[in-house]
Image (cartoon, rainbow, N blue to C red):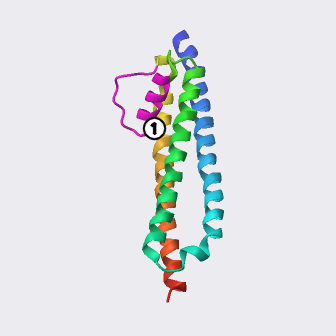
Amino acid sequence: MRSLAVRYPAVLIQLALGSAILTVTSLIAALSWWGLESFLNRIHRWTVQPPYGPKLTGVLSLVMLWALLIMMASVWIWAIALWFLGTFVTLEASVYFALVSFTTLGFGDILLPMEWRLLGGLAAANGLMVFGLLTAMLVETLRETRQRQRWQGP
């Protein structure tokens, strides 16, 4: 009976902490998209002038670089949180575990301690959410840019 009483609060703490990190990384992705969209609106005139192909490639490259930065920021947030919790001895191990979990690779060569193991699943769920969000934003950027080029093209 006692072990159940000890584990139940630990589960809640893991869920609360993981949910907080998930919320922070999602907010960072959403707010940074807002900033990127503002920048893309500013360069609108440039993107709708011929030649279209190189400009579309430039816009997509910019958005892919932005997506990579958001993913890396999210991985670093997880890694630093795991390191501060003392789950790993080195920051490198924390970054490695966060990256493997966030990308849902799950090699299994490094594991979280039993008292923090739910955070691995939450990091993977966060990775799925962020990858989905970034993919949707990349597709939307492609669609919007092509639509603007067609509408205002020759």
Location of residue 82 with respect to 24 vertically, above or below: above
| 138 in the magenta segment | no
Q: What SS does tag 1 mark?
A: helix
Which residue appears at 55% of the width and 10% of the height?
A: 2
Instruction: Judge by depth and name the residue closer to the eye, 58 or 70.
Output: 58
Other-residue count near label 1 (Cα within 10 Å), few / some / many at <14 / 14–19 / ≥20: many
| In this view, 114 is above or below 136 | above
As rendered, which of 137 and 7 lies closer to the eye?
137
Judged from this view, the residue extending furthest toward the top is 2
The residue wearing badge 1 is 102
What x and y, as percent, mark residue 97? 44, 28
The residue located at (57%, 27%) in the rendering is 80
Q: How many marks?
A: 1
Residue at image coords 60%, 36%: 21
Provide residue 60's location: percent of width, then percent of height: 47, 62
- Residue 34 appears left or right of 73: right
Whether residue 1 is visible to the viewer of this picture, yes or no, is no
Q: Residue at x 52, y 60 (%)?
A: 137
Using the rendered image of the protein, determine whether residue 42 is visible from the camera's viewpoint: yes
Name the spot of residue 142 as percent of width and height, x first.
47, 68
Q: Nearer the viewer, residue 92 or 154?
A: 154
Q: Is residue 98 above or below residue 109?
A: below
| Stretch of the chain drawn in magenta | 92-112
- Residue 115: percent from the left, percent from the top? 51, 18
Residue type marked 1: Phe
